[in-house]
Amino acid sequence: MALILDSMLHLTLLVGAIALLYKLSRLGRRGDFLPPGPPTIPILGNAHQIPTTGFNARIHEWAEQYGPVFSFILGKSICIVLNDRQAVHELIDQKGALFKDRVYDRQALETFHGLNYALMDATPMWRAQRKLTVKMMSEKNLDGPMREIRDAENASLMHDLLEDPDRFAAHIGRSLASAASIVVYGQRAKTLDDFWNTYTHAAHKAVTETLSPGSYIPTDQFPVLDLIPYSWNPATLKARKARETLDGIWQEARQRVDKRRAEGDKRDSILDNTLDGSLKSDITLSDDELNHMCGTFIEGSALTTSITIQTSILFLAKYPEYQDKAQQELDGVCGDSRVPVWEDFDSLPYINCIAKEAQRIRPV
């Protein structure tokens, strides 16, 4: 009896070992049902071809070689890249219920601990926060109270550019950070050293240093790496440090607004209106959830717009003939007595195309 049990145990272990080896041999392979892509190697797939920096350049290189829809493999994970407008429309717009949810990422979870609604799954919390943002950023608000904010900051920016052109990038960043901070917190960034300007850069630095593709151990793609203790994993330690930084930034922003409100100064902003109850969430938000919702809005507005404007300046400086054409169009519509306003939009098609091209050629 003991001999039979012993034989069965050995047979079970052998079958288990064979199954494990077979599974490992399949790990990293591209299935026949997938779009084309770079050749894979066992287990790793294409992980060995992912650079620690410049991941976007590698994606562009593969798109040129394998077409507008291609795939690459990272261990057990399948990544499909859509580099075609029609493919994006068909899969993300028309079949969004199937394809547009967020991918689970341990590093992102460690960094934001599930409070950044730009990276949430389509949960009730995500829907509630998205609804609040859409309500505040409606066309009525953009063309109403926010228009005055935008026009005032544009005038201030032009003054700064005339007085101190060498620091043009910093002035653009301050202007956009200020506009976003007024909308979200009711606070203006008056100078480059103002907290309501510098906090955007501190948050951006913490996020990019922690979540840049290729800069952290891919435990989601290779679960065996999850056995590495947190104290030995520099990426996890970096994520926790970034989380502490972000928590501190958004808490300080909230404390400054709370202090202003305690002094009787209440303003028209996302945070003020939420605290007053005039802007209601479908789900009750904790202080942390509200703080990070406001912080996510800042992260997704100030720096992205600033970078797009700097891209326009970069290419207009590189190709001044297009800058001259834009200037001629602007002078023909506005003359030299005023700046353009929103009503001039239809009369400035060339400048409209420049703005769109900046978003296409170097998308944030």
Image (cartoon, rainbow, N blue to C red):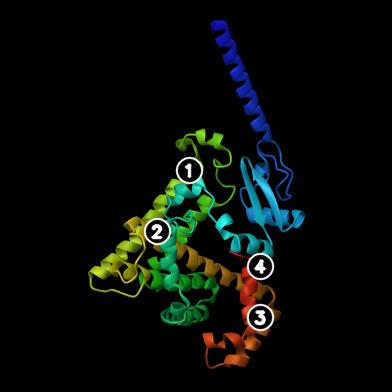
Alpha carbons under labels 3 and 1: distance apart: 46 Å
Alpha carbons under labels 3 and 2: distance apart: 40 Å
Q: Which mark is residue 323?
A: 3
Q: Residue at x 50, y 47 (%)?
A: 107
- Please tell me whether mark 3 sits on a helix, a strand or a loop: helix
10 Å crowding of disc 3: few (<14), some (14-19), many (20+): some
Q: Is residue 73 left or right of residue 152?
A: right
10 Å crowding of disc 2: few (<14), some (14-19), many (20+): many
- Please tell me whether mark 2 sits on a helix, a strand or a loop: helix
Q: Residue at x 45, y 50 (%)?
A: 111
Q: Which residue is mark 4?
A: 361
Which is nearer the N-term, disc 3 or disc 2?
Answer: 2
Residue 318 against residue 148 in the figure, above or below: above
10 Å crowding of disc 1: few (<14), some (14-19), many (20+): many
Residue in the foreground of this view, choosing between 30 and 174: 30
Q: Which mark is residue 292?
A: 2
Which is nearer the N-term, disc 4 or disc 2?
Answer: 2
- Please tell me whether mark 4 sits on a helix, a strand or a loop: helix
Query: What is the residue that sits farthest to the front in this orientation?
Result: 1
Q: In what quadrant of the picture does the N terminus appear?
A: top right
Q: Looking at the image, is mark 4 or mark 3 nearer the viewer?
A: 4
Q: Which residue is mark 1?
A: 236
Q: Please state which amino acid type lies under the numbered disc 2.
A: His
Q: Looking at the image, is mark 1 or mark 2 nearer the viewer?
A: 2
Residue in the foreground of this view, choosing between 235 and 342: 342
Residue 285, position as x, y percentages in the image: 34, 59
